[in-house]
Amino acid sequence: MKKEFKVKTPLYSKCIEVPKIIDKATGIHILSRFVKAIIFTTDVVVIKNNNADAIMAVYPFTPQPILSHALATVANMPLMVGIGGGTTQGDRVVELALDAEFQGVLGVVLNAPIDNKTLSAVRQAVEIPIIVSVVSTKRVEERLKNGADILNVCAGKDTVEVVKYIRDRYPDVPIMATGGSSDKAIEETIDAGANAIVYTPPTTTQLMKDLMATYRT
């Protein structure tokens, strides 16, 4: 067995570590990167201090280029950014996709309600991968036909079932999925067919609370 070497320093050794169980995933080769663990956050502190393979930055507001630019300057790993698909539709989504590509992001993420016409227009406009969020087993085939490169399953308690449904019918489609908060849930998601796991880290508020509790002892 080859020895694993680690180099750390006292000030920079602390970071948010993704669950080790994610190593069990097969991973996805996205352009020049190999991705298994994806952290779901827009917090620049978390983005700068974690050991994931990539960042997924999607937020519940109208996407704005200035936010994508800011996140791209902080991230020291591949970044996938949300460009709408819910409230934001049509030409605006296409323009946001182009801007994101010009910023050098690894891929763009479209929310589940995206209409197929807009999805197709994004596909024609950009060369980077398009990740479409899926919340049920409906509309999977039309998403793939209209330009989705990767499906991001975020179906809550039904995530494992939706992942299995897609994997059984589309064995060659790359799947990302939210894995839940426990190793058991993550493993079940991987076993169902997810190639990469989207992990939601603790907030900086929670981390600070834990740190202050340590300081007070």
Image (spheres, rainbow, N blue to C red):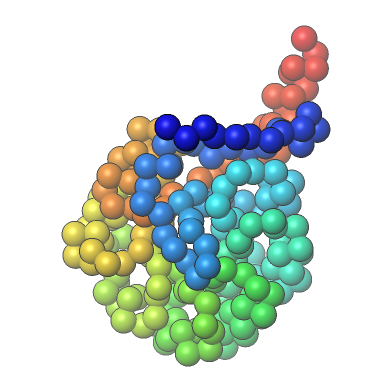
Depicted 12 relative to depicted 193: above or below: above
Depicted 70 relative to depicted 164: above or below: below
Residue 206, picture quadrant: top right
Q: Is residue 57 visible?
A: no
Locate the N terminus by quadrant: top left
Residue that protrudes farthest toward the left in the picture: 168
Residue 183, picture quadrant: top left
Position of residue 94 measured from the top left corner of the image (x, y, whole percent)? 57, 84
Q: In front: 88, or 36? A: 36
Position of residue 150 measured from the top left corner of the image (x, y, whole percent)? 40, 67
Residue found 44% across the figure and 63% down from its top: 29
Residue found 54% across the figure and 44% down from its top: 200
Q: Is residue 54 visible?
A: yes
Question: Does residue 18 appear to the left or right of 23 in the view shown?
Answer: right
Residue found 43% across the figure and 42% down from its top: 22
Position of residue 52 measured from the top left corner of the image (x, y, whole percent)? 57, 47
Position of residue 62 measured from the top left corner of the image (x, y, whole percent)? 64, 70
Locate the C terminus by quadrant: top right
Residue 165, picture quadrant: bottom left
Residue that protrudes farthest toward the front in the picture: 2
Residue found 23% across the figure and 64% down from its top: 171
Question: Does residue 196 appear to the left or right of 203 in the view shown?
Answer: left
**How many badges with numbers are in the image?**
0
